[in-house]
Image (cartoon, helix red, strand yellow):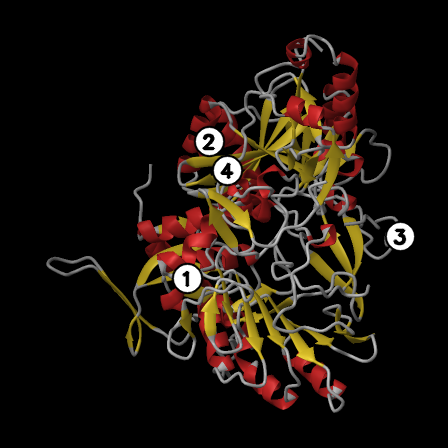
Amino acid sequence: MTNTYFLLFPSCVPVNGTKVSIIMDLDKGTYLEIPNLLHDILSIDLQRFTIHEIMKKFDHQYDQGIKEYFQFLVDNQYGFYTKDPKPFRKPEDIFYSPYKIISSVLAINTTTNYDLPEVLKQLDRLSCQLLQIRIYDPYDMDKLFNSLSPLKGSSIKICEVYVCYYSLISEEQLITICKEYPNVIIVVHTSKEKKQINISDEFNKKIVFTGEQVHANTKEVYDPSLFTISHSMYYESRHFNSGLHRKVCIDTDGSIKNYLSHTKVYGNIKENKISEIITKPKFQERYFITNDQIEKCKSCQFRYMCVSNSDIIKKNGKYFKKHTCNMDF
Amino acid sequence: MIDDSEKYKDLISIPEHPSISYDLHKISISHQSKKNNSKRFIYMKKYRGEGSILDFYKPNSNILSIKEND
Amino acid sequence: MKHLIFSEKTDFSVNRVIDWLAYYDQSFEKFIGPTENKDLFIYNDKTFSFTFGGKGFSNSSKVYKQSQINTATTWFRRPYKNCDHFLQEYEYQGAYPREKLDYTIYQRFRVFWDFIGYKLSEGHHFGSFKINELNKPIVLQEAQKIGLLVPKTLITNSKEELIHFLRDCNQKIITKPIHEVMRDHHYELEKDEYLFIYQMTQLLEELDDKPDIFAPSLFQEYIEKEYEIRTIYINGECYSTAIFSQLNEQTKIDMRNRDANEPTRYFPYKLDASTEEKINVLMNKLNLNFGAIDFIKSVEGDCFFLEINPVGQYGDVSIFGNYYLHKKIAEFLLNKKEKK
């Protein structure tokens, strides 16, 4: 033990919370709850101090606990012992993305008259990866099928479409859309019956019918099942707002926003190109406010895995999220 | 990848011969079916080739209160 | 001016570099060998003219189809080795055997294709056109000459020599393919059911089983490892990660044998300066500005050089080291930085 070091793998990131801490496992996409004291021990520069020296730092008060916890972490492949820690390097704490738009949400209702195919073309040119289209009211499925045509051959990875149930909705047409556009996932909301239609084994896709409603005031949910634990997400959330960074949303009237629930409007798709709006420093302001800078979130152990799109308010030089949760235990 | 070499041993029977190198007697075989490895690649103009779909590092970036019931 | 990429039909690491090229508003052409795909760059519809020599005669290279095609840079990611993309059907009724004529024609295109690779390599390029020339035993010998530690190696077709070698290596040796020919081979059993044939590094502890007769094969001492090291060499820079494949019993010998639920752990790593310098010398000697280089760190603390893959995967090292290698490659292509 005297000349042995314990190192955590860099994919295993200790994050402290108010009452409890966690180790995020970026490789497995899971997290492990740990006591705050262990977090403090793991926050010591483990490459500089041997296990023995760490024990000494705590006046040998926790020798047994340190020994057992380190062994537990080794057994569960969160870390390892080594006699030569020098060649190991912490990954550089940086995040870059080649996508000018990472994600986007478009809202449509009966009064909407912006050019959907043109919006899709613009988003594809900006390398948008994740797209969500929320259609609040009954909508003609033939029209939807045709409007989605720019998705063909596009590099948009996922396009979630929420369509509103109506009595004449044709399941056949929904299936046709899913088959024509493999990157489209359809959810039918406000449905009388809850069910699923399997589309293809190949893509493991299905159409979900849900009784819940999607409308202009639908709230975001914050739930552990919706947390995202991944390498890119972790580094992104260290430097950018995990929800709003490179996100652009277009409301039913064509307003261009950071997110649909925000009040601030930066332009209108009927007059402006998306590219001209998203390059404005005002539009990008929220990109750079990380959870580490926001009150409450900054002491939450889930701050590098929570994707919240809440608007951010500044009060007395401090940032606050407009919508918060109570998950920081 | 699962090593199924024992199971499919007879499928590739490598003869002992001065033209065949030693390592070829130690070939491994893995059985794979397309269904399990659901192929999520489609042609994308940007890459002039196949790109992967339905896979993203933060798929829950636009959270709604609707949860898939599975 | 466009970037010319030599790739394969599906190559996700190329896609990630294209993402960065798009980010920097660069355009590219992709060549993958013979293809029906109209989007892709092909050679058999183009006209070529190369001039040089003489007195007062100018050196020139022209590739054109209606207008001249200028290549800004070339990335030999996975260069197409054959030259059948130049061959077109022709009528022949002569008495001389058709296949011999075909062979003659093919060999001539071979020389011309190599010449095109040579001309493209004169310009700013990344990767190597001539990956076929990388010979595993030669690379090991060259590495040893430069002072890198290489595992005890035997190349033989003699069982007797092999038995001696096994004894020398404490009854633990491995055999690996001298050249990876059967790699990634799919054999279709029935619809959607495949057998994937691959070659892993195999541990040998006894030699009582067959074969007794075999062609020249490569054997090395088995090295008990603390971890593996994979270094991605990009134009003078080494980006390394330690790979803890020995944590799982299945990946102890070869990390391809892994369980999807148990991730392999990585740790960004810095090779010592002298090893990095030797790698640089070796890569310069082999005329490579890209390579995925494998090492083993033994439990005794020695660092063994294993091999260089000039078309190796670098995505894992990039993600786990947070090195942004796709971005670095795109920037190398468009900045035309001078080689170190």
**Type of residue at label 4?**
Asp
Residue tagged 1: C22
- Cα distance in 3D space between marks 3 and 1: 47 Å
Q: Are marks 3 and 2 in contact (CB under 8 Å)?
A: no
Residue A51 picture location, percent across and down: 68, 14
Say which chain tag 1 marks. C
Mark 2 element type: helix
- Cα distance in 3D space between marks 2 and 1: 32 Å
Q: Nearer the viewer, residue A179 or C38?
A: A179
Q: Nearer the viewer, residue C266 or C90?
A: C266
Residue tagged 3: B7
Q: Nearer the viewer, mark 2 or mark 4?
A: 4
- Cα distance in 3D space between marks 3 and 2: 42 Å
Q: Are marks 2 and 4 in contact (CB under 8 Å)?
A: no
**Type of residue at label 3?**
Lys
Mark 3 element type: loop
Residue tagged 4: A93
Q: Is residue C86 visible?
A: no
In the image, taking residue A280 as reference, residue A322 lies left or right, namely right
Q: Nearer the viewer, mark 2 or mark 1?
A: 1
Give the residue displayed 59% in from the left and 26% down from the top.
C304
Q: Quadrant of the N terminus of chain C?
A: bottom left
Say which chain tag 2 marks. C
Q: Is residue A238 above or below residue C148?
A: below
Q: Earlier in the sequence, mark 2 or mark 1?
A: 1
Q: Is residue A83 visible?
A: yes
Q: Are callouts 4 and 3 both on one chain? A: no
- Cα distance in 3D space between marks 4 and 1: 24 Å
Mark 4 element type: loop
Q: Is residue C27 above or below residue B20?
A: below
Q: Which mark is residue A60?
A: none
